[in-house]
Image (cartoon, rainbow, N blue to C red):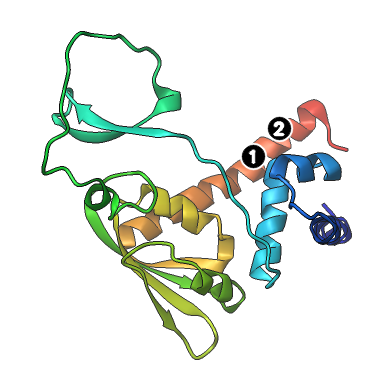
Amino acid sequence: MPRGDQLARQWKIIQTLITSRRGKSAAELASDLECHPRTLYRDLEALQVAGFPIYTEKVEGKNLIGYCHLRNEVRVFALDRIKMLHQTKESFEVAEDFDFEEFMRPSFGVYQGKPVKVRIWFSPDAAGYIKEKIWHESQDILSQKDGSIIFEAEVAGTEEIKFWVMSWGSKAIVLEPESLRDEIRVEAETALAAYGREFALLEDSVGTS
């Protein structure tokens, strides 16, 4: 998409929000702009990074914490992925020593896993937005002389933080652990190859406007 169209759309977002007393939902903005919600979220994030005081709230899927008899441990279950429920006459009691806050504390979202220390470099144009928010209870942010920052935290597994880092594109680089850096590099190389190979095939079969 031409840069001019992107700037025009972002300017319209700003004007729409300024004139709206109650704010606008993502669905409403996407409808007004006649664009995909993903495009809208990218525009909102770009405006936030640029310093505009725009705040977004995404409704995440609901989850259930329960004991998994298959793995013999407490797990997090996504409700929208449960295919079937069967009511039994059995009852249960939550263990007295179960602490919900402590159970969720290491997670970067809802995923569980072994504690992993991560160090992520953010470019100067993304640093301001990163510093404004509490992303994780254990986070530590180290400012660099060139305006960039290094984000440090100890998280439960790397699956969720991997996608968070990737959402920042070239503005974020994993310093540690090496395994996470390798995973993201493979994802990026695979995506690049797909754009070169699959898009060419798609273009030949359906054409582009």
Q: Is residue 44 above or below residue 72?
A: below
Residue 202 in the image: state x and y as whole percent. 73, 31
The residue indicated by pointer 1 is: 197
How far, Cα to Cα, is label 2 from label 1?
7 Å
- Residue located farthest toward the bottom when viewing the structure as drawn: 145
Residue at image coords 66%, 65%: 48
Structural crowding at the residue carrying mark 1, measured as other residues with C-alpha within 10 Å and reported as few (<14), some (14–19) or many (≥20): few
Q: Quadrant of the C terminus?
A: top right
Q: Which of 73 and 97 is in front in this view?
A: 97
State yes or no: discs 2 and 1 in contact (Cβ < 8 Å): yes
Q: In this view, does 124 lie above or below 23?
A: below
Left or right of 107, for residue 7: right
Residue at image coords 27%, 51%: 101
Which structural element holds mark 2?
helix
Q: Which quarter of the picture shows residue 146?
A: bottom right
Left or right of 115, for residue 124: right
Q: Which quarter of the picture shows residue 134?
A: bottom left
Q: Which quarter of the picture shows residue 64?
A: top left
Structural crowding at the residue carrying mark 2, measured as other residues with C-alpha within 10 Å and reported as few (<14), some (14–19) or many (≥20): few
The residue indicated by pointer 2 is: 201
Left or right of 168, for residue 155: left
* Figure disc tally: 2
Going by the numbered disc 2, the residue's amino acid type is Leu
Going by the numbered disc 1, the residue's amino acid type is Arg
